[in-house]
């Protein structure tokens, strides 16, 4: 069994991520995982969104929301580094809800990267969620809830930013196809989310 993210983080030296290869890129499946979530999924996360490095939106066209370490501790203890899929919801405070569109407050598909972002050689383990939706404004400091439902691929290094961007776009499409399955799609209405926020 591969080491968990927490076990990797405890090592004296961070394990090196393999480089993406052309063979890996060509062989990527269109859908991954079983027909319903299997242990350790679903994993439920919640916490205030923190400012990250700001590279997702600027460098990669894929803005991400970082969760604090204590919000992701459960996942790092049971899951390995890599890219995951599931659902997420942004929950602004009552006095800020009017600054969002109703669609912004829905439970939305997401992809999540957990690891060290080897292309950027991060020194700290991070969990970054990209919600697949064009928000009208940022939501730093606001609560975000997420349910991680499955694993897409391992963390990789890249020889170019373009190769990384291509893989991210593939991750998004794989995630959307995975979530179309009925036993995954039902988690969109899980009690972990605050569905009344979008119904009122």
Image: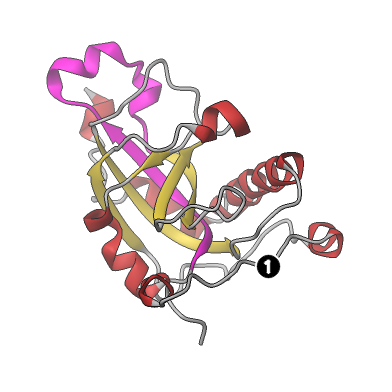
Specify whether 49 is left or right of 117: left
Residue 80 at what x, y percent from top left? 47, 71
Q: Quadrant of the C terminus?
A: top left
The residue that mark 1 highlights is: 18
Extreme residue toward the front, this view: 12
- Quadrant of the image occupied by residue 58: top right
Residue 33 at what x, y percent from top left? 59, 68
- Name the residue located 33 percent from the left edge and 28 percent from the top edge: 105
Whether 85 is among the magenta residues is yes
Front residue of 141/28: it is 141
- Name the residue located 66 percent from the left edge and 57 percent from the top edge: 157
- Quadrant of the image occupied by residue 196: top left
Residue 118 at what x, y percent from top left? 58, 56
Within 10 angstroms of label 1, few (less than 14), some, or many (20 or more) residues? Answer: few
- Name the residue located 74 percent from the left edge and 61 percent from the top edge: 29
- In the picture shown, does residue 146 fall above or below 37? above
Specify whether 55 is left or right of 173: left
Extreme residue toward the top, this view: 98
- In the picture shown, does residue 114 fall above or below 120? below
- Name the residue located 22 percent from the left edge and 27 percent from the top edge: 92
Extreme residue toward the bottom, this view: 1
Whether 84 is among the magenta residues is yes
Residue 135 at what x, y percent from top left? 43, 21
Highlighted magenta segment, given as a residue range: 81-107
What number of labels is visible? 1
């Amino acid at each position: 069994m591969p080491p968990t993210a927490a076990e990797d983080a405890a090592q004296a030296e961070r394990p090196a991520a393999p480089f993406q290869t052309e063979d890996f890129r060509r062989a990527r499946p269109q859908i991954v995982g079983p027909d319903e979530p299997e242990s350790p999924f679903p994993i439920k996360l919640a916490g205030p969104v923190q400012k990250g490095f700001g590279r997702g939106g600027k460098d990669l066209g894929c803005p991400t929301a970082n969760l604090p370490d204590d919000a992701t501790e459960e996942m790092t203890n049971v899951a390995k580094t890599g890219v995951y899929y599931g659902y997420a919801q942004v929950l602004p405070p009552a006095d800020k809800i009017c600054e969002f569109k109703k669609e912004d407050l829905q439970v939305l598909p997401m992809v999540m990267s957990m690891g060290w972002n080897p292309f950027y050689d991060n020194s700290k383990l991070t969990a970054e969620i990209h919600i697949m939706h064009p928000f009208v404004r940022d939501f730093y400091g606001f609560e975000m809830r997420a349910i991680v439902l499955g694993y897409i691929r391992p963390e990789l290094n890249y020889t170019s930013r373009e190769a990384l961007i291509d893989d991210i776009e593939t991750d998004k499409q794989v995630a959307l196809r995975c979530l179309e399955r009925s036993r995954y799609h039902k988690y969109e209405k899980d009690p972990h989310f605050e569905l009344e926020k979008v119904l009122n």
